[in-house]
Image (tube, rainbow, N blue to C red):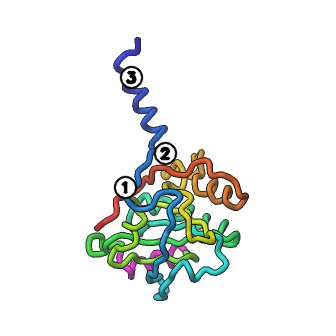
Amino acid sequence: MMSKFTMIALAIILTGATAFTARTTIGGYQVGDYATDFSLKNVDGKMVSLKDFKSAKGFIVIFTCNHCPYAQAYEDRIVALHNKYASKGYPVVAINPNNPEKQKDDSYALMQVRAKEKGFTFPYLLDEGQKIYPQYGATKTPHVYLLQKTSKGLVVKYIGAIDDNYEDETAVKAKYVEDAVEALLNNSEINVKETKAIGCSIKV
């Protein structure tokens, strides 16, 4: 018979093992849904819509921001995703969902500064009025929605985290977004279609 300590330890291990794979989307899109387009202001001052990307096969839409430590921890990995997959038809489109009146560090002006500092070559858009993130169902920064272009529209193929270790990139064991994009490029089934987004809550 297991001791009380052993049972508690086992519970902690099981919780950690499932932390990235539990469903967290409340409302918004689910895998298999069709995503609507949007028109949001980029850090270069231009309005951006997904329909602008004529040659894209899909999009890695990431709700992220300036101030959140989780978002900052993933910035280099987001840049790497774009560098790896934009030329293959899956560019990153980053969206800041936060209300800058509630979080001053996520203002449009500071988004421009951050994008320049980090060398973003992908759109970094402001969800002004916070109308888009609720449509998607994003709850954290970062929160990923992988979309695939089809004849009927943009289909949501993956929702959740970028990978399974925000703290240490060298310790990552599961690259959820990369694996999902690779599956789409190879016309294969995505093995993990949804994980738990780990990050800061969206500021409303």
Query: Which label belongs to residue 26?
Result: 1
Nearer to us in this view, 180 or 83: 180
What residue sits 47% from the left and 40% below the top? Answer: 18
Q: Position of residue 162 (x, y in %)?
A: 53, 56
What residue sits 68% from the left and 57% below the top? Answer: 182
Residue lying farthest bottom?
Answer: 45
Instruction: Give neighbour class at mark 2: few <14, some 14-19, many 20+ (Cα, 10 Å).
Output: some
Query: Which label belongs to residue 82?
Result: none
6 in relation to 44, above or below: above
Instruction: Give neighbour class at mark 1: few <14, some 14-19, many 20+ (Cα, 10 Å).
Output: few
Residue lying farthest left?
Answer: 102
The residue that label 2 is drawn on is 21
Q: CA distance from mark 3 to mark 1?
A: 31 Å
Quadrant of the image occupied by residue 197: bottom left
Instruction: Give the residue type at disc 1.
Output: Ile
Instruction: Give the residue type at disc 2.
Output: Thr
Q: Position of residue 68 (x, y in %)?
A: 39, 62
Quadrant of the image occupied by residue 57: bottom right
Dot 1 lies on which element? Answer: loop
What residue sits 57% from the left and 46% below the top? Answer: 171
46 in relation to 156, above or below: below
Q: CA distance from mark 1 to mark 2?
A: 15 Å
Q: Earlier in the sequence, mark 3 or mark 1?
A: 3
The residue that label 3 is drawn on is 7
Are the residues tagged 3 and 1 within 8 Å (C-beta)?
A: no
Q: Position of residue 24 (x, y in %)?
A: 41, 51
The N terminus - image quarter: top left
Q: Earlier in the sequence, mark 1 or mark 2?
A: 2
